[in-house]
Image (cartoon, rainbow, N blue to C red):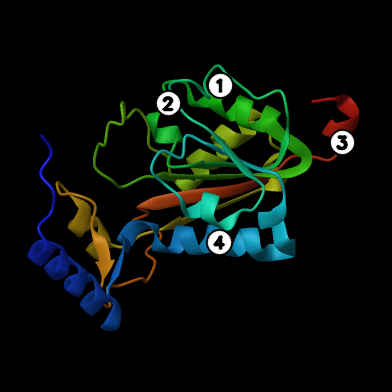
Amino acid sequence: MAMTESLPGALKRRSKQVAKRLIGYDSRNWLRIRQIEAFTAFLEVDNRKSSPVIEVSPGWNRYWKTMCSNYTSVDFPDFDICKDRTERQYQIVIADQVLEHVQRPLAAARNIHAMTQPGGWAMVATPFLFRVHARPHDYNRWTPAGLKQVLVEGGFAEADIEVFGWGNKACARAHIGGPVRAYGLWRDLSNDEEYPLMVWAFARKDETRRNAGA
């Protein structure tokens, strides 16, 4: 039988949450702060957040569902991005912390490309310097250049892909061998290009694909 939380316990937990907010404590994953900011800013441009958006395997992540008004999602195992694609195409296709978990990333990239409308965008993020986290599997890591190449081989034109990375030694040390680390208070957000913990890309599908039917 599941145990219910006692009133004193609930009050104590709630008071800790309030205190953290008051002092500016940030519970978001440290290595994802800049990537989340970049995705948020991208969706705000030209009100992209109101476009038809599909997210691949969001799991417990609710960032983009909360932000996007015309949102749908598909989840593993019912939908396997390595072999499945939607019949409909979308203006925005999001794969946030997905590609490291797929067995055939090039097949996944091709399906992401196929699901993107001509002139639309794929938003892809994946860790690089991060511990193994099998959910249910963990297969892959890429540098920014490596992620770009995956998307090129998936069908996006190299000139239509922007890739980014963020990380530093302090954040890398905090994550080695341990659980996900909260940003907390005043942690270092400077970027060291030699230590990318998180990489992400914005890839635009060529408008000419509309005429080609791809």
Type of amino acid under label 3: Thr
Residue type at mark 4: give it: Thr
Q: Secondary structure at mark 4?
A: helix
Q: CA gap, disc 2 to disc 1?
A: 9 Å
**Pointer 2 or 3: first along the chain:** 2
Residue picked out by circle 1: 107
Residue 72's x, y, as percent? 60, 39
Q: CA distance from mark 3 to mark 1?
A: 22 Å
Q: Nearer the viewer, mark 4 or mark 3?
A: 4
Question: Marks 4 and 1: which is nearer the front?
Answer: 4
Seen from the viewer's position, the closer of residues 122 and 25 is 25
Residue positioned most to the bottom: 23
Residue receiving disc 2? 102
- Mark positioned earlier in the residue sequence (4 or 2): 4
Secondary-structure class at tag 3: loop
Q: Nearer the viewer, mark 2 or mark 3?
A: 2
User: Left or right: 53 with respect to 180?
Assistant: right
Q: Secondary structure at mark 1?
A: helix
* Tag shown at residue 40: 4
Where residue 61 appears, as percent x and y from the top left, is 42, 47
Tell which tag, 4 or 2, sits nearer the viewer. Answer: 4
Q: Residues within 10 Å of mark 1 (few under 14, many from 20)?
A: some
Q: Is residue 147 above or below residue 66?
A: above
Please rate how many residues cluster around mark 2, counting C-alpha atoms within 10 Å: few if below 14, some from 14 to 19, many from 20.
Answer: some
Give the quarter of the figure containing the C terminus.
top right
Measuring 18% from the left and 74% from the top, which residue is drawn there?
15
Residue 208, which numbered label? 3
Q: Quadrant of residue 22?
A: bottom left
